[in-house]
Image (tube, rainbow, N blue to C red):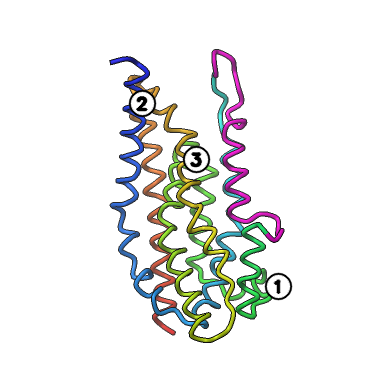
Amino acid sequence: MSYRHDTAELEERLRADFRAAVNEHRIFGSPFFRLAERLTRTDLRRLAHEQYYVAAHAPQAYAAIIAMAPDRLVAGEPVPYWETVAPVFDLLTRSAWGNGEPGSNRGRFLRYAASLDIEESALISNHRLMPETVTFVEARTALCNEGGLLAAIGGIAALLVASEPYFEGLLAAARRVAHDDRLGVDPTYFEGHAQSDGKDAERLLDVVIPGMASHARSRSHEEERNDFFGGIETMLDARAEWLAALARMVADD
């Protein structure tokens, strides 16, 4: 077997292991996904404050990953790794929040909030936040700041994949509420995430999987795997706790 073919096989194996680690996590059994089917307009208003805080702090976490990325060799020449990572995370930063232009997710979210009669000033005040929302954001930021490159990218990629049913559930709820209440609810924020998060996760994996596969015969490979999959578990555990708190909040209404 050629080295190139062997490396390609190892890359696919790592991607399969990533998918298994995400799909087998308890997060997909969260009661929030069942409750999403019956969210009311009042529920969507309360959830908007939590989601705003989570989304608005994402760029800070992504920037930390770029800042800590090490240099590497490409064709024998030293190349700052951030030159590879930065385009991906620039894309994710825009996707996660943007600067408020109409096509950015921030712009879409503000339109969504406005359709629920929530002004941006009320979102920024954070006075209605659950403590679990702050804890989740702090866990994500800590992983990106301190967890190391592989753990951070593994965790964020897993978070993107695991977030798909969350956004799909909120999208369905927004459409149903708009229909039942005969009041406009702008769903484009959720549509964007439902359509792009899986693709963004693949772009992240493209940053680290080839390097991990090329190190398969080195002493560092097992350590790299532990870092990568440890980041996945850490991030999904934190997200699962947040979703459980959202479920309790909705169920208590």
**Which residue matches tag 1?**
121
**Magenta run includes residue 79:** yes
- Most extreme residue toward the top is 76
Residue 208, compared with residue 116, is above or below; it is above
Q: Position of residue 147 (x, y in %)?
A: 48, 41
The residue lying toward the viewer, choosing from 132 and 120, is 120
**Which residue matches tag 3?**
203
Left/right of residue 230 with respect to residue 174 in the rendered view = left
| Mark 3 vs 1, N-terminal side | 1
Residues at circles 1 and 2 in contact by the CB criterion of under 8 Å: no
- Mark 1, other Cα within 10 Å: few <14 / some 14–19 / many ≥20: few
Residues at circles 3 and 2 in contact by the CB criterion of under 8 Å: no
Which quadrant would the N terminus be assigned to in this image?
top left
The residue lying toward the viewer, choosing from 199 and 212, is 199
SS for dot 2: helix
Q: Position of residue 8 (x, y in %)?
A: 36, 26
- Label of residue 8 in the image: 2
- Mark 2, other Cα within 10 Å: few <14 / some 14–19 / many ≥20: some
Three-letter code, disc 1 = Ser
Residue visible at 40% across and 37% down in the picture: 227
Three-letter code, disc 2 = Ala
Q: Quadrant of residue 237?
A: bottom left
Nearest-to-viewer mark from 1 and 2: 2
Residue 219, compared with residue 17, is above or below; it is above
Residue visible at 35% across and 42% down in the picture: 18
Left/right of residue 186 with respect to residue 151 in the rendered view = right
Q: Which residues are magenta?
A: 74-102
